[in-house]
Image (cartoon, grey):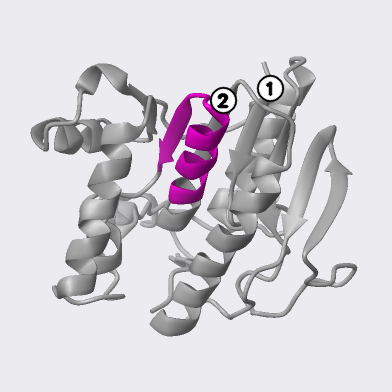
């Protein structure tokens, strides 16, 4: 199967869309599925293009057996609504012609949360007359409302209608949670075309050490897991129960979300 995958981010960037798409495409290539990833040049989150790259109209490279077509985008740091919107729109305008120039695939996949990536994938799928798969990682317009990127105004309503149109027109929607499928079904989207594929970990990349070790004995470790605002409330297990032994316990959170 030939897969044409559109994503705004791809390694060497390390945010979720980049890593997720890289792992998927790497496994597909290893399984004998040909295809191409259309992505922007790496600059997330600083707004500076990574060393070894130059923001040009088109560049082709091969990473881990995957053919990657890089396209020009408006380079901006991951903050500020207007500049990020220009980045999203520029990817749409660059990715569509670049993808149309590729050999006809068997399927076109567009990933969110960047909605215009999915829109570009749908346009390409229609023009190439192949199925369109929407990889749904955040609900629109809920995701941008939750992070305060837009108020409840006309623009948000337009984006909501655009997202709903993509949900309706997708031949298949790959959702990361059951709750997303429930929400879309309540909006009239056929639940039969929604497949839930939860996040997972490639265990081959990890080698566990002994449980009884000097670091573990010196520091009690509590784990706290957080979810993006659109996935539900913040979840904090009872970390204190694992932090009762001295000398101390530290809880740290990390995120690349910014407003």
Mark 2 closeness class: few <14, some 14–19, many ≥20 residues within 10 Å: many
Q: Are marks 2 and 1 in contact (CB under 8 Å)?
A: yes
Horizontal and vertical percent position of residue 42 = 72, 64
Query: Of 13 and 240, which appears nearest the observer?
Result: 13
**Above or below, comparing residue 90 to residue 163 in the picture:** below
Q: Position of residue 67 (x, y in %)?
A: 81, 38
> What is the number of the mark on residue 188?
none
What residue do we see at 44% from left, 69% from top? 257
Q: Secondary structure at mark 2?
A: strand
Q: Magenta segment range?
A: 119-136
Occupied quadrant, residue 245:
bottom left
Residue under pointer 2: 107
Q: Determine which quarter of the picture holds residue 68.
A: top right
The residue that mark 1 highlights is: 2
| Residue 33 can be seen in this image | yes
Q: Relative to residue 245, is residue 44 drawn left or right?
A: right
Whether residue 241 sits left or right of residue 232 in the image: it is: right
Residue 116 to residue 80: above or below:
above
Query: Which residue is pictured at 57% across the width and 31% down the height?
Result: 128
Q: Is residue 211 visible to the viewer in this orientation of the structure?
A: no
């Amino acid at each position: 199967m030939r897969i044409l995958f559109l994503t705004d981010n791809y390694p060497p960037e390390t945010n979720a869309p980049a890593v997720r798409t890289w792992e998927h495409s790497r496994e597909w290539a290893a399984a004998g599925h040909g295809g191409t990833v259309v992505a922007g040049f790496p600059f997330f989150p600083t707004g500076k293009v990574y060393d070894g790259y130059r923001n040009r109209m088109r560049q082709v490279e091969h990473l881990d057996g995957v053919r990657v077509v890089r396209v020009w985008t408006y380079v901006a740091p991951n903050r500020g609504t207007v500049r990020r919107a220009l980045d999203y729109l520029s990817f749409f305008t660059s990715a569509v012609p670049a993808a149309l120039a590729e050999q006809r695939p068997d399927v076109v996949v567009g990933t969110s949360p960047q909605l215009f990536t999915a829109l570009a994938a749908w346009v390409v799928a229609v023009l190439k007359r192949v199925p369109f798969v929407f990889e749904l990682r955040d609900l629109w317009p809920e995701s941008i409302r939750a992070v305060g990127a837009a108020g409840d105004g006309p623009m948000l309503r337009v984006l909501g209608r655009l997202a709903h149109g993509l949900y309706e027109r997708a031949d298949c929607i790959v959702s990361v949670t059951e709750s997303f499928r429930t929400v879309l079904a309540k909006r009239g989207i056929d639940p039969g075309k929604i497949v839930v594929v939860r996040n997972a970990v490639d265990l081959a990349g990890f080698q566990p050490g002994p449980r009884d070790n000097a670091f573990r004995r010196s520091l009690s470790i509590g784990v706290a897991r957080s979810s993006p605002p659109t996935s539900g409330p913040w979840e904090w297990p009872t970390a204190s129960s694992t932090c009762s032994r001295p000398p101390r316990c530290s809880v740290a959170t990390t995120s690349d979300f910014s407003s």
